[in-house]
Image (cartoon, helix red, strand yellow):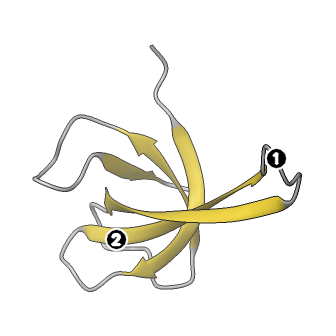
Amino acid sequence: MPKRILQGVVTSDQNAQTVTVSVERRFKHPLLQKTVRKSKKYRAHDEQNQFKVGDVVRIQECAPKSKTKRWEVIAQ
């Protein structure tokens, strides 16, 4: 099964080898037909600590790295 790839913005880089990435998705509400924006935060593994707050990054699913990390940053 292919690994999911998401794109988002780094919102925190304070932890060692970890970044928090906020991913936003847009969809139409089924009844109101209004465009809705939902966002979710993912913790991703950043091996070299190279990404800073505000960077647009792509993250990919991976095997669990820790209790909360299930994603890794793809080098751009």
Q: Residue at x 11, y 52 (%)?
A: 66
Give the percent coordinates (x, y) of residue 2. Answer: 49, 20
- Asked whether, in this view, residue 69 is left or right of residue 67, the answer is right
Q: Residue at x 23, y 53 (%)?
A: 69
In-front residue for pair 26/69: 26
Give the percent coordinates (x, y) of residue 4. Answer: 50, 34
Q: Residue furthest right?
A: 33
Tell me the residue that label 2 is attached to. Answer: 19
Q: Amino acid at mark 2?
A: Val
- Asked whether, in this view, residue 22 is left or right of residue 33, the answer is left
Q: Amino acid at mark 1?
A: Leu
Check disc 1: other Cα within 10 Å, few if <14, some if 14-19, many if 20+: few
* Label 1 close to label 2 by CB (< 8 Å): no
SS type, badge 1: loop
Image quarter of the C terminus: bottom right
Give the percent coordinates (x, y) of residue 52. Answer: 45, 82
- The circle on residue 68 is none
Label 1 vs 2, first from the N-terminus:
2
SS type, badge 2: strand
Check disc 2: other Cα within 10 Å, few if <14, some if 14-19, many if 20+: many
Tell me the residue that label 1 is attached to. Answer: 31
Residue 26 in which image quadrant: bottom right
**Vertical side of 30 occupied by 55: above or below:** below
Residue 13 in which image quadrant: bottom left
Image quarter of the N terminus: top left
